[in-house]
Image (cartoon, rainbow, N blue to C red):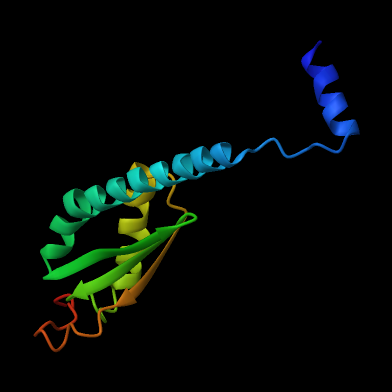
């Protein structure tokens, strides 16, 4: 019997869910693994490519989360509250991350509210 005939019989009998509990478990594990690899790649790029550049201004950009293409980052150190941080994020960090980790589609950031208490001031370019 051909595959088409089998599918026709299953369809005629309203059998359309081919996922067994075992299939579901395998599917979930397959979905988890790439996300773990993506997060590992994101953290590598942040540590090796981004951190040295922002550290020159006493800044830090740290990983918060990644879900469905959206990466959330914490702007810490002198990056927190810096007027240039949005530009740095969009033109620098986002381009680098999208280059090395194409699964990243959007980057969102939030400022570290404790940066000032830790003695950090937003970086200002000398003019």
Q: Depth check: 90 or 11 in front?
A: 11
Q: Residue at x 15, y 83 (%)?
A: 121
x then y, percent, for residue 35: 40, 48
Q: Residue at x 81, y 25 (%)?
A: 7
x then y, percent, for residue 84: 28, 73
How many numbered discs, if any?
0
Q: Depth check: 65 or 93 in front?
A: 65
Quadrant in which residue 41 is drawn = top left
x then y, percent, for residue 5: 85, 18
Relative to 27, 60 lies left or right? left
Relative to 29, 8 lies left or right? right
Q: Depth check: 72 or 96 in front?
A: 72
Quadrant in which residue 86 is drawn = bottom left
Residue 99, placed above or below residue 56: above
Relative to 32, 93 lies left or right? left
Residue 57, placed above or below residue 2: below
Q: Residue at x 45, y 42 (%)?
A: 29
Which of the image's four quarters has the C terminus? bottom left
Residue 97, placed above or below residue 85: above
| Residue furthest top as drawn | 1
| Residue furthest bottom as drawn | 117
Q: Residue at x 88, y 34 (%)?
A: 13
Q: Depth check: 102 or 14 in front?
A: 14
């Amino acid at each position: 019997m051909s595959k088409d005939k089998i599918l026709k019989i299953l369809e005629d009998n309203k059998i359309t869910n081919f996922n067994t509990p075992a299939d579901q478990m395998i599917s979930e594990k397959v979905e988890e693994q790439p996300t773990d690899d993506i997060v590992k790649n994101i953290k590598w790029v942040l540590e090796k490519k981004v951190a040295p550049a922002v550290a020159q201004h006493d800044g830090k950009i740290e990983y918060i989360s990644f879900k469905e293409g959206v990466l959330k980052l914490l702007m810490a150190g002198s990056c927190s509250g810096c007027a240039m941080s949005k530009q740095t994020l969009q033109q620098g960090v986002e381009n680098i991350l999208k280059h090395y980790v194409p699964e990243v589609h959007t980057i969102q950031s939030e400022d570290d509210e404790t940066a000032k208490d830790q003695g950090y001031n937003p970086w200002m370019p000398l003019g």
